[in-house]
Image (cartoon, rainbow, N blue to C red):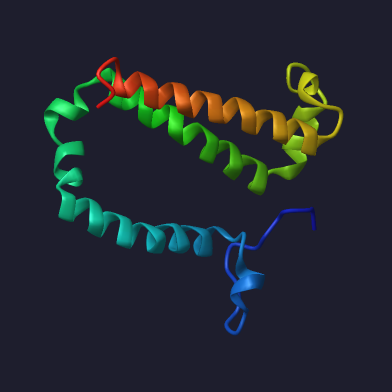
Amino acid sequence: SSVGAAPRAFPRGTSLQAAMGRAEVDVLLVLAAFVPLAGRAAQLGVLRLCASPSCLGQASWWIGLLGISLNYAMHGFIWNRPEAFTALSKQPPLSNLGKHPVDVFAGLEVVAKLIQFSAIAFFLGRSGC
């Protein structure tokens, strides 16, 4: 079996630590993590505002959402396809970030944080809110 490859289902009695990295567990943990966040957002009325046509119709909303999400998509790709990432990290332009895949990942993290910051700044605009 290849590094990072995981079976689609895991047997009963498998510990949570052993199950980590499997798609089913990852999705369940993400959903569980959103429960308190969604509850608080609902209390504050944020969910209603984010789902409103005035928000969904703004390009800045979608650019902000995309800018924040890109880093998580990158993490998912690297986690689930380490061989592909290693191969990509040896080719330009990624090879310009470092000689080792870990160095490339560190450089990509800096780039991703700059993108996230820019996306949030674009969403907030000049008013800051």
Height in image: 107 above or below 5?
above
| Residue furthest front in the image | 127
Q: Nearer the viewer, residue 12 or 18?
A: 18
Query: Seen in the image, is 60 located left or right of residue 78?
Result: left
Q: Quadrant of residue 87?
A: top right
Q: Position of residue 85 (x, y in %)?
A: 73, 36
Give coordinates of residue 13: x percent, y percent: 60, 84
Quadrant location of the C terminus?
top left
Quarter where residue 95 is shown = top right
Q: Could you tell me residue 119's position as x and y percent?
A: 41, 24
Residue found farthest to the right: 99
Q: Residue at x 80, y 58 (%)?
A: 1
Query: Which residue is rendered at x = 30% and y = 17% of the image?
Result: 125
Residue beneath the point at 22% across and 21% down: 58
Counting from the top left corner in percent of width and height, residue 60 is at: 30, 20
Query: Is residue 44 shown above or below 110?
Result: below
